[in-house]
Amino acid sequence: MQNEFPPGPQPHPLVGNLPEFRKNPLEFFTLCARHYGDIVRYRILNVNVFLLNHPDWIEDVLAGDHRNFMKGRILRANRLMLGNGLIINEGDDWMRQRRLVQPAFHRDRIAAYAGVMIAFTQRLAASWRDGETFDILPEMKRLTLEIIAKTLFDADISSQAGVVGRALQIFLEEFAARTGNGLLVPERIPTPGNLRLQRAVRRLDKVVYRMIQQRRLSGQPHNDLLTMLLEARDERGNRMSDQQLRDEVMNILLAGHETTALALTWTWYLLAKHPAVEHRLFAELDRVLGGRSPEVTDIPNLPYTDGVLKESLRLFPPAWCITRVALRECEIGGYAVPAGTSLSVSQWVVHHDPRYFEDPEAFKPQRWENDLSRRLPAFAYFPFGGGPRRCLGYSFAMTEAVLIIAALASKFRFSLAPGHPVVPWPSITLNPKFGVRMIISRRMPLS
């Protein structure tokens, strides 16, 4: 971190450079916020970026004048995989898409999905052997991918989960590689990484287009998202093309499994590091479930389990940073923001801010008791984003994660494999750089 700027309030100091940012983006953002305050200007190559660290100003961007801010250029450059789906589309087209997809995430539908969530979790658990050691992240990705495919597209892709999961992982790896050096290499340039990405997208397209075609030809009734999309018509009465359907399915497959799998992985890591929290979680599960499988109606009776998940999302938010670009000149926090300026808001930074969370580095699920969520400023805790573009599947993800934690922690204990480093590393999501190797042990109910 460069320190050539005078002390005192510095709303827009130019700090940092590419090597400092690449070395550890989480540390870079944290130091920017702690040293320079709630509005910091840093420079990456020839691009000035404003880092906003106050909930009120984050709200201005994500919820207030949200139409003046579009997705960042790096995310928008990934159209080979994402197409024109919900993740990167903008404006009225995005609003129409969201309205079409939103009914699939209604509370009653999510409750109906709970049986699938539990059944697939039990199927995964049945494949584990007592005492074996493996990286827990691929296991969680496999599980959440199969759940999202079955619940929203009525497709059991268990036989293809390896192919689909690997292709999605290649996208994430190449996204990081294409952007990690600060230079956005266009997808059309035939670099080895881009060619690898293109092959992965072709494999995914084959699976997704086959799913769409089979559904068109089946003639069987299905009450799922894919059927809604197939039957949806725009204001002119036109149905979605296969390309549009493909884009939406691809966006939901990616967003619907990656972040939840990471949330679960970080939860198992934190529980393994904090035996007192783990013991209290086990006690709640044993008391409420009594050895049976959890059901969606159990969730209100599992407040500590819910707090464990919320605290994990606070300490290790899978979506660790959001970037927007100002379309018009505006004002934030009393400072002028020129048109075209990039603005970053970091869940990692704000979730670790002692102004909002006492002892912010500690893992304390009990802090969520007595409605902490309602007492916090609106954007002091925003693991799923916020405003109109808040993650559409946040209720789905929370329900799914609580049920998976309850189902697995009722039967197993997760211990960290000795000597294996666990390092949070921010790419498009907050991943463990070297995975999280864990020893899986069956447990008996607490006496």
Image: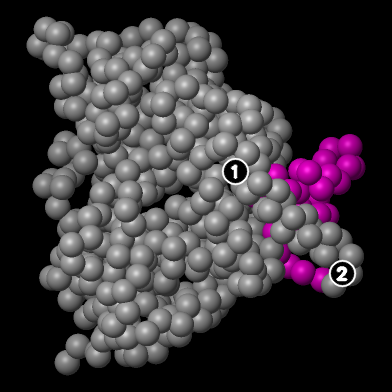
The local secondary structure at tag 2 comes to helix
- Looking at marks 2 and 1 on the same chain, the residue that comes earlier in the sequence is marked by 1
Which residue range is magenta in the image? 221-250
**CA distance for labels 2 and 1:** 33 Å
Quickly name the residue at label 1: 196
The image quarter in which residue 283 lies? bottom left
Residue pointed to by mark 2: 218
Position in image of residue 161 (x %, y %):
59, 66
- Residue placed most toward the observer, 158 or 305: 158
Q: Note whether 33 is above or below 78 in the view shown.
A: above
Instruction: Name the residue at 19% across, 88% down.
Output: 446
Residue 237 position in % (x across, y down) = 89, 42
Which of labels 2 and 1 is toward the front? 1
Q: Is residue 376 above or below residue 118?
A: above
Neighbor class of circle 2 (other Cα within 10 Å; few <14, some 14-19, many 20+) is few
The numbered dot on residue 41 is none
For mark 1, does the 10 Å Cα neighbourhood hold few (<14), some (14 to 19), or many (20 or more) residues? some
- Left or right of 421 in this view: 3: left
Quadrant, the N terminus: top left
Report the amino acid beneath label 1: Arg
Q: Is residue 15 visible?
A: yes
Q: Which residue corresponds to the image point at 46% horizontal and 82% vertical from the top-left?
A: 127
Which percent across, then down, holds residue 225?
70, 59
- Disc 1 is placed on an element classified as helix
Q: Amino acid at mark 2?
A: Ser
Q: Is residue 231 magenta?
A: yes
Nearer-the-camera pick, 177 or 364: 177
